[in-house]
Amino acid sequence: MKVMNEDIRNFVLGLGVDDVGFVSADDYKSPRSPSLDSLFPGARSMIVMAFRELTDQVVDRSDYISVRDLQTGMRRTHHENHSGIR
């Protein structure tokens, strides 16, 4: 599992995320959100990503990645890595 976590960490950091971590799904408790099991039945862990807070300064938007871009990249990589498995 540690090797997989490092592969995920390196991939996500390469997309421009500032930090990434992993947590057990059992530790997720949020009174303001639906239960994790209702969103992702059977999930055993979560990937948590952190982004720098934008300031009032002018920011070059090309340095940042949108969540949609991140999800698209992750789906594409997952498909490429598992397309030969049947």
Image: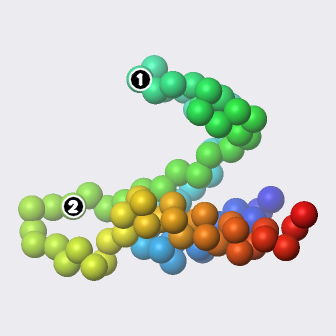
Q: Quadrant of residue 25?
A: top right
For the N terminus, the quadrant is bottom right
Q: Residue furthest right?
A: 86
29 with respect to 69 (left or right): right
Label 2, on which residue? 54
What's under tag 1, amino acid-wise?
Answer: Arg
Image spot of residue 67 (x, y percent): 41, 59
Q: 34 above or below 21?
A: above
Label 1, on which residue? 32
Q: Secondary structure at mark 2?
A: loop
Image spot of residue 22 (x, y percent): 62, 51
Image spot of residue 86 (x, y percent): 90, 63
Task: Residue at 46% x, 26% y: name it.
Answer: 33
Which mark is on residue 40?
A: none
Query: Is there any visible trace of residue 76 in the rendered image?
Result: yes
What's under tag 2, amino acid-wise?
Answer: Leu
Image spot of residue 43 (x, y percent): 71, 39
Task: Residue at 75% x, 73% y: name it.
Answer: 81
62 with respect to 5 (left or right): left
Q: Please tell me which of labels 2 and 1 falls first in the chain.
A: 1
